[in-house]
Image (tube, helix red, strand yellow):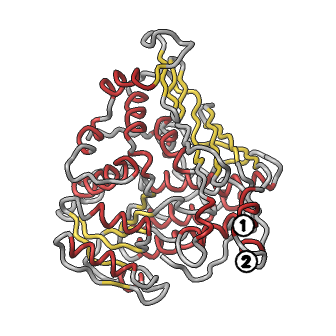
Amino acid sequence: MAAAAAGVTAMGSKRGLAAENSEQSKSKGVTMADHADKPMDRVRVGFIGVGARGSGHVEQLLLIDGVDVNGICDNWEGSAERSAQACVKAGRPKPPVFDKGDYAYRDMLARDDIDAVFIATPWEWHVKMALDAMNAGKHVFVEVPAAYTIEDCWKLVDTSEKTRKHCMMLENVCYGREELMVLNMCRLGVFGELLHGEGAYIHDLRGQMNEVEHGTGSWRTVHYQKRNGNLYPTHGLGPIAQYMGINRGDRFDYMASVSSPSRSRAIYAKEHFPAEHKWNKTPFKCGDLNTSIIKTTMGRTIMVQWDEQLPRPYSRLNLIQGTKGLWGGFPDRVVVEGDSPNTESFEQQDQLKRWYDRFDHPLWKHIANDPSNRGGHGGMDFVMMWRLVYCLRHGLPLDQDVYDAAAWSAVGPLSEESVRSRGKSLDFPDFTRGLWKNREPLQISV
């Protein structure tokens, strides 16, 4: 969705993190921890932003039983109409289209035939739209990261608690086959006591800078010019957080972050754009590689890396180390004491089949091979959508809640503040306000 000019800020509060956190000791409503809303016979949805990502969400949900598409909004000419026509092509009624300006989505939110809203817009619009949707009585499913200031993370938490509406960040990687299997192995104790994890988003996205007037690069490139830290932490971090039971028996305690020099995007801009082009007018601030270290209250450690510009193969790392063994991704490898041939060499490639045969997650086995699954990213997108619809229709708690959205997203602003402070460690807010101590780790049965 194209957005009107909105300032990109590094932090949401000039008073500092300590002042923000001290003011959030009391809930503005009732906790959303393990909240289950009443079952829905049908899930009536609306979409805000149907560009490259949002249009895929429309196509996925059209494949799932029990879903009605009752509104599509995008302010870029033709985008909303194309997704509306996709509904017609799928044999559904054409939904109303809202495409007249940046705030046309509010007209869609005024409808009483929409239960849930999917938001896939530029980052600076996520929180504004999510708050408006929850205050209008809609459940919210928002793309990653949900927010990029601590203040906005708290706004999502407070509004979800006040309105009693779900606010789930659409972290699709948690529904990948590998990630679900490793979650299953962690719950079964295969790796013993979990001690350390590593997650990342390493993806050469310099080519997005060619999307100058419209598309992801048109707004995302501006963030690289204004911010320095981990701008996109959740793809690698989300699964690690679920393995470790973050916000469910443990939580992020504090973190420190450092960034490398910023080089690659300036080089790319000089090689691909004229000297007077806007990508060459403003220096790039964001370091090419950011590394953050998180300590949890139980003493466990997590390394999170981010790099969207260096010439380097794609990786999310996806490493979890326990007292009995390890799983590592990219490339996939495993070693488990007492089960692997020895602990000094990994089982890899064809040797992994026996692990998938034993530990493939029930949810993946139930859904991934469904004939209707035409999901992107190896099937994880469809599994995510199917699962959230299943939870809504059966009145079950969601696998990711607003506290996860806030904690995982908070790595972004905390990393920026730490980088500015020469790697100083910073405390995480406790978005659950202490309820993490008595919650059980995530269990997904189907």
Rendering coords of residue 169 (x, y %): 45, 57
Q: Earlier in the sequence, mark 1 or mark 2?
A: 1
- Asked which secondary structure carries label 2, the reply is loop
Q: Amino acid at mark 2?
A: His
Rendering coords of residue 213 (x, y %): 58, 79
Whole-number angstrom distance, CA of label 1 to CA of label 2: 8 Å
Rendering coords of residue 291 (x, y %): 70, 44
Residue drawn at x 53%, y 23% is 322
Q: Is residue 130 above or below residue 249?
A: below
* In this rendering, position of residue 3 left or right of residue 37: right
Rendering coords of residue 316 (x, y %): 54, 42
In contact (CB < 8 Å): disc 1 and disc 2: yes
- Asked which secondary structure carries label 1, the reply is helix
Q: Dividing the picture into quarters, in which one does residue 262 lie?
A: bottom right
Q: Which residue is mark 2?
A: 277
Q: Is residue 159 above or below residue 195?
A: below
Q: Amino acid at mark 1?
A: Ala
Residue most extreme to the bottom: 100
Quadrant of image for the C terminus: top left
Q: Which residue is mark 1?
A: 269
